[in-house]
Amino acid sequence: MSDVKLYGFQRSNYFRTARLTLEEKGVAYDIETVALGSDEVRAVHPFGKVPSLAHGDFVIYETSAICRYVDEAFDGPPLQPGDIKGRALVEQWISSLNRNYDTDMIRHVVRERLYAPLRGLEPDEAKIADALPRLEREMEVLDSQLGQSAYICGGDVTLADLFLVPMMSGFQQTPEGQNALEGRDNIAEWWERMAARPSFAANTVE
């Protein structure tokens, strides 16, 4: 049994980002599957959300904090640049991914197109349509960024890439995602590079 435990469930994009980070760093960890709002999750997250991480008697929640802690607390390849400008760029992209891309890709499209039918609900087409113009711009910006380097923030994988992988995984399964990604060759090549990494198995939804 490891002294690192990750709380959450595999359908959570942010849980998967935390798993990808642990995998990239080569950290041994155990998974504690918990449900949102349950007593088990509230014991490690005051708002009943996921993920949370326990390292011995130290418990931390919020994905950005978890990932930075894992990157800095354990050996393994660094997932943040060594210079302040590089770290600022990673922070910029994580913030944008969480605020803009997650909202439109996941909350407006994936949840409506993929998950609503699983609950016996009809997708909210108006909500999906509202996101489409923003998604076009977001994919344009992302594709342009990936045209400059192999990964979002340079020649090495960073935390920014690990935040995007689970989002992109679901988004490209939707018709809207396929349309928005058509002709975005830089994004497609980035996806192939990420999918080839050993850590990618931690992205799979069980």
Image: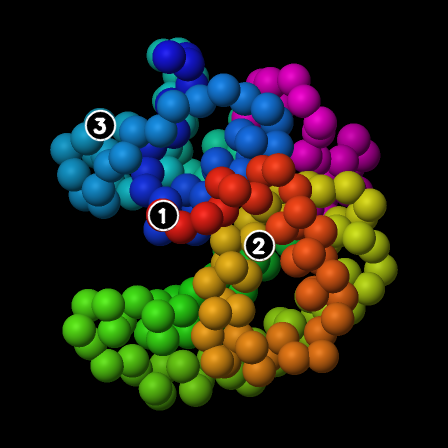
Marks 1, 3: nearer the viewer: 1
Q: Residue 164: which disc?
A: 2
Asked whether residue 95 appears in the rendered view, the answer is no
Q: Residue at x 68, y 56 (%)?
A: 192
Question: Exactly how many numbered labels are in the figure?
Answer: 3
SS class of the residue under badge 2? helix
For the point 81% across and 34% down, the residue is 83
Q: Amino acid at mark 3?
A: Ala
**Viewer can see residue 73:** yes
Residue 70: image x %, image y %? Answer: 55, 26
- Residue 43's label in the rendered image is 3
What residue is rendered at 24% in x and 37% in y? 34
The residue nearer to you, when weighing 53 against 185, is 185
Percent from the top left, x then y, of residue 100?
53, 65
Q: Is residue 79 magenta?
A: yes
From the viewer's perspective, is 138 left or right of 201? Answer: right
- Nearer the N terminus, badge 1 or badge 3? 3
Residue that sits furthest to the left in the current view: 39
Q: CA distance from mark 1 to mark 3?
A: 25 Å
In the rendered structure, which segment of residues is drawn in magenta?
70-92
- Mark 1 residue type: Glu
Which mark lies nearer to you, 3 or 2? 2
Residue identified by numbered label 1: 206
